[in-house]
Image (spheres, grey):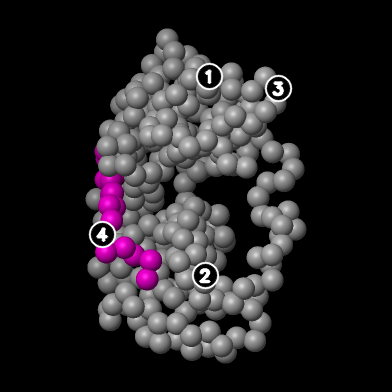
Amino acid sequence: MVVWDNCKGSESPSAFLHIEELSDPDKAYKVFLKNHTCYDLIPLSAKLVVFDVTLNVKKAFFALVYNGVRVAILWDSVEQKHVGMLTITDFIRILHRYYRSPNQPMTELEKHQIKTWREQLTEYQRSLVYITPENTLLDAVRMLLKHKVHRLPVIDPISGNPLHILTHKRVLKYLHIHISELPYPSFMKKKLRDVNVGSMTNVCVVNQNCPIHTALQYFIEFGVSALPVVDQDGQLIDIYAKFDVINLAATRTYQNLDISVYQALNYRRGKFQGVAT
């Protein structure tokens, strides 16, 4: 039997005692997610950024940097609805599509509005996938998997206002907070390889001297979120992740993508703790 009490507040859809029979410990996490809603993950205070699609692309990414966020929800004032999201992946696609050389400025990045860019890269566009506060976390996880997205806006079904952006990390963190209260599933004792978690074969890596524009191509071509960086001897020395690319906007160095990955990593904001293995 699993028993827990969510104490976020009386307004929470799941702010009541849950009691559910559980004969199989391997289903503990699924039962937990099924009995908690997206509302439970919404923080009391958080920063949420919304851009109108008429905003200049360059200003949009600078705004992401200024606000310290990685994603913004897009609003179309003509259609009067939220139409998509702007992420670091979009920044990567723009740089990859329009970069030519350090001597040829990317005028498209300087002049285009978000809606113009969306019209030109229609192959990447999809309808906005979102969820409501009343949906369960299990619903959210299934939607993240089904639609192969990393972020899921939580939108109020009545007002239409975005409340939060739910991510895999946020769900895992919430589960980790309560994990000591739950039965221990047998699969938690297994190795990552045995449960097929992570990339174990054909791992895409980059040499530290690899130019940034090649790394951007790998992000798009292989659909990975991070690239292991190796030295001349093939030893792992760092990680170049998608979120590192936003530093090109922060440091205004995106006009020269011929610099090496090693040089770009020197622009990383904040202290890097090293690679954990």
* Residue 207 percent coordinates (x, y): 63, 24
Task: Sort mark 4 into few (<14), some (14-19) or many (20+) by Cα contacts within 10 Å.
Answer: few
* Residue 257 percent coordinates (x, y): 48, 20
Q: CA distance from mark 1 to mark 4?
A: 39 Å
Identify residue for label 1: 260
Query: Which residues make up the magenta segment?
Result: 40-56
Residue 59 visible (yes or no): yes
Question: In the rendered image, which quarter is residue 129 located in?
Answer: bottom left
- Note whether 157 is above or below 166 in the view shown: below
Q: CA distance from mark 4 to mark 2?
A: 24 Å
Q: CA distance from mark 2 to mark 3?
A: 41 Å
* SS for callout 1: loop
Q: CA distance from mark 3 to mark 1?
A: 17 Å
The mark nearer the N terminus, 3 or 1, is 3
Instruction: Name the quadrant of the C terminus.
Output: top right
Type of amino acid at the residue the image marks with label 4:
Ser
Q: Closest to the observer: 95 or 237?
A: 237
The verdict on residue 210 being magenta is no
Identity of the residue furthest to the top in this view: 103
Identify residue for label 2: 179
Q: CA distance from mark 4 to mark 3?
A: 47 Å
Identify residue for label 4: 45
Task: Sort mark 2 into few (<14), some (14-19) or many (20+) by Cα contacts within 10 Å.
Answer: some
Type of amino acid at the residue the image marks with label 3:
Asp
The mark nearer the N terminus, 4 or 2, is 4
C-beta proximity under 8 Å, tags 3 and 1: no
